[in-house]
Image: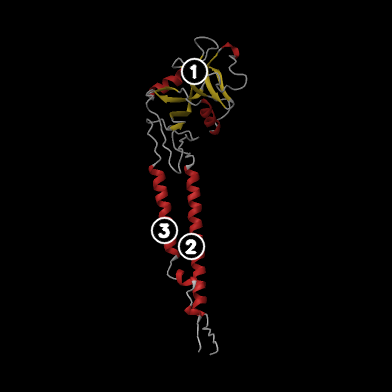
């Protein structure tokens, strides 16, 4: 007896993939990524700050005014006109770090709401609270140079006391302390931080930085690129495998009776 077996009689692995479209694989992965983004957006929220208070640092709504330097008293009045006061930063170190990143010109500080005008050496916020012992003063500060430095400002090296009659930029916070920016952690976006731009436009609160969100977008772009490359490569390999499968000659194996 004789048994004849051809290559096409075998159930090849290519038979499984011949009916599988690389395009469908790409679509499925893309849909999965879409729902991941949707879930991240749905689970991350930020409350709205009042108008002109678009800079958010550690959940605090602030207005950073960098185009209109004023003496300390006039800076306070300008904040009042915005329905606010000179800022009492809930995160002094974070606010200083932010100011350092803005590259404003040296020698021009940022007024915030503290002074020792009532009692020399006793620094209090405008709400009457004492500055904490670990307050990030610049080295050698406060030094009350000339016996006339009684108001708090932020410089490129830290916080220091300054003469109230000198002009500086200033930072306001809303009088309504219930206006608090909050973030809700999601699986991808864990924090959203809004910062003011370096431009001299009158509205200082333009969004320029989204922490982690930008990283997520970059990672997503890389994943999409990898998916496209993988799909194209898989398609080429399957076409070659199919061509080899179809062009392979029939081989017969005879066994003696």
In this picture, residue 150 sits left or right of residue 79:
right
Q: Determine the secondary structure under disc 3.
A: helix
Please say if the residues under marks 1 and 3 sit with CB atoms less than 8 Å apart: no
Residue at the disc numbered 2? 231
In this picture, residue 139 sits left or right of residue 202:
right
Residue 138: % across, % down: 59, 22
- The residue shown at (46%, 29%) is 64
Spatial CA distance of label 1 from label 2 is: 61 Å
- The residue shown at (49%, 53%) is 223
Spatial CA distance of label 1 from label 3 is: 57 Å
- Within 10 Å of disc 1 (Cα), the crowding (few <14, some 14-19, many 20+) is many
Can you say whether 135 is above or below 233 in the image? above
Please say if the residues under marks 1 and 2 sit with CB atoms less than 8 Å apart: no
Residue 154: % across, % down: 54, 24
Numbered tag placed on residue 28 in the rendering? 3
Front residue of this view, candidates 9 and 170:
9
Residue at the disc numbered 1? 114
Disc 1 or 2, which lies upstream in sequence? 1
């Amino acid at each position: 007896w004789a048994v004849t077996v051809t290559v096409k009689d075998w159930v090849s692995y290519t038979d499984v993939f011949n009916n599988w479209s690389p395009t469908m694989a790409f679509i499925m992965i893309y849909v999965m990524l879409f729902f991941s983004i949707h879930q991240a957006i749905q689970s991350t929220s930020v409350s709205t700050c009042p108008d002109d208070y678009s800079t958010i640092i550690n959940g605090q709504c602030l207005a950073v005014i960098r185009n209109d330097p004023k003496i300390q008293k006039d800076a306070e009045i300008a904040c009042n006109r915005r329905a606010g006061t000179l800022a009492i930063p809930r995160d002094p170190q974070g606010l200083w770090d932010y100011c350092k990143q803005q590259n404003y010109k040296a020698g021009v500080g940022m007024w915030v709401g503290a002074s020792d005008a009532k009692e020399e050496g006793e620094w209090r916020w405008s709400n009457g609270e004492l500055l904490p012992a670990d307050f990030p003063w610049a080295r050698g500060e406060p030094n009350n140079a000339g016996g006339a430095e009684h108001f708090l400002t932020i410089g490129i090296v830290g916080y220091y006391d300054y003469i109230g009659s000198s002009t500086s930029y200033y930072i306001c916070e809303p009088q309504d302390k219930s206006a608090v920016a909050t973030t809700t952690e999601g699986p991808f976006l864990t924090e959203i931080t809004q910062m003011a731009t370096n431009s001299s436009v009158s509205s200082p609160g333009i969004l320029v930085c989204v922490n982690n969100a930008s990283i997520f977008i970059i990672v997503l772009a890389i994943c999409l690129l990898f998916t496209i490359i993988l799909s194209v490569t898989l398609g080429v390999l399957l076409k070659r495998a199919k061509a080899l499968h179809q062009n392979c000659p029939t081989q017969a194996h005879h066994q003696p009776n």
